[in-house]
Amino acid sequence: MDIKVLGPGCRNCVTLEQRTQRALSELGLTAEVEKVTDPGQIVGYGVMATPGLVVDGRVVLSGKVPSVRELTGILGG
């Protein structure tokens, strides 16, 4: 599983990364979570509001920080 957290490094981006790691742990999954901070790359995914989350090349959310429970549903589904 390839996961990217899109954002400039703001508090919400850091929180999304932490919650994503926690959700992966709860699911018993291992994945490398990459931070993407380059504005050009972020826009290249079509994300206009950060933070964003990309799983296996597909944008699964943007502009909000979901709960760990929501993330387990996204990542485990």
Image (cartoon, rainbow, N blue to C red):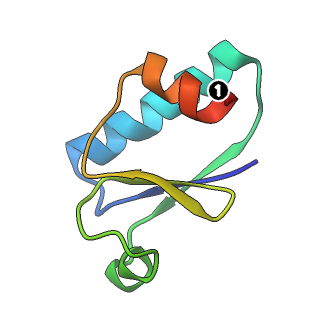
Is residue 39 found left or right of 71 in the rendered image? left
Q: In which quadrant of the rendered image does the C terminus lie?
A: top right
Picture coordinates of residue 38 (x, y %)?
A: 38, 77
Crowding near pointer 1: few (<14 within 10 Å), some, many (20+)? some
Residue 44 percent location from the top left of the image: 44, 83
Q: How many marks?
A: 1
User: From the viewer's perspective, is 68 left or right of 39?
Assistant: right
Determine the image quadrant of residue 66.
top left
Q: Position of residue 7 (x, y in %)?
A: 33, 60
- Among the 4 quarters of the image, the one containing residue 8: bottom left
Residue 75 horizontal side relative to residue 6, left or right:
right
Q: Is residue 51 above or below residue 46?
A: above
Q: Helix, strand or loop at disc 1? A: helix
Relative to 33, say whether 23 is above or below: above
Q: For mark 1, what is the residue?
A: 24
Q: Kindly identify the residue that appears in the image at 26 percent across and 43 percent down.
A: 64
Query: What x and y, as percent, mark residue 42?
Result: 39, 74
Name which residue lies at 45% across and 24% down. 70
Q: Nearer the viewer, residue 41 or 57?
A: 57
- Residue at (45, 39) in percent of width and height: 17
Residue ID at (34%, 69%): 47
Dot 1 amino acid type: Leu
Left or right: 29 in relation to 75: right
Pick the residue in front: 25 or 49: 49
